[in-house]
Amino acid sequence: MQYKKTTAILLAVLAAAFYAVNVPVSKLLLKEISPTFLASLLYFGAGIGIGLLYCINPKSRRGEKKLTRKDLPYTLAPILLMLGLKSASSANASLLGNFEIAATTLIALLLFREKVSKRLWAAILLITLSSGILSFEDMSSLHFSRGSLLVLAAAAC
């Protein structure tokens, strides 16, 4: 049992590390690769990872449905992220990725009628305010950064 717990913790830390380096490394790669091609490489890498998982544990694919054309709009998030990252700083894009928490909570509330506690509402408010502040390109003219808005759209997707 301890082995499974240690493995789960190790995999969680590894996933967090990969997630953390994704934006800065992508920013560097965007100097040489187009945003849509880089987004496709991210999906390709995820596909390889899932394929390896299926090879190691064939039982893990039970109940999985195949992707259809109806699922195509959901592939938009990495494209929007890479387009936004092209003109936003990697630090700003990383911080704006936290808006995904607020977007996911609102989707759960509106579509699935999940209950949202007062503490979570406070967290959503703070995340949304900080995302708004980070999105301003010029505070004097209240101009939003195009890159930041694309990153926020990616987080919402």
Image (cartoon, rainbow, N blue to C red):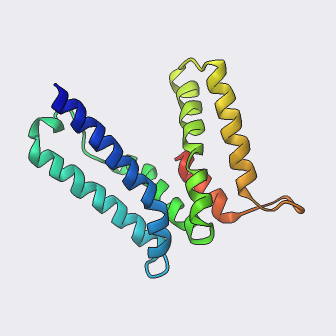
State the residue in front, 101 or 18: 18
Residue found at x 56% / y 64%: 90
State the residue in front, 101 or 19: 19
> Residue 24's spot in the image, x, y percent?
49, 65
* Residue 18 versus residue 10 in the image, above or below: below
Q: Is residue 64 visible?
A: no
Residue extending farthest bottom: 32
Residue found at x 64% / y 22%: 119
Q: Is residue 115 visible?
A: yes
Which quarter of the figure is the N terminus placed in?
A: top left
> Residue 37's spot in the image, x, y percent?
40, 72
Instruction: Count the marks.
Output: 0
Quadrant in the picture for residue 48: bottom left
Q: Is residue 131 left or right of residue 59?
A: right
Residue found at x 18% / y 27%: 2
> Residue 15's spot in the image, x, y percent?
35, 48
Q: Is residue 47 left or right of residue 149?
A: left
Q: Is residue 29 left or right of residue 9?
A: right
Residue found at x 66% / y 57%: 149
* Residue 130 versus residue 5 in the image, above or below: below
State the residue in front, 1 or 39: 1
> Residue 143's spot in the image, x, y percent?
81, 62
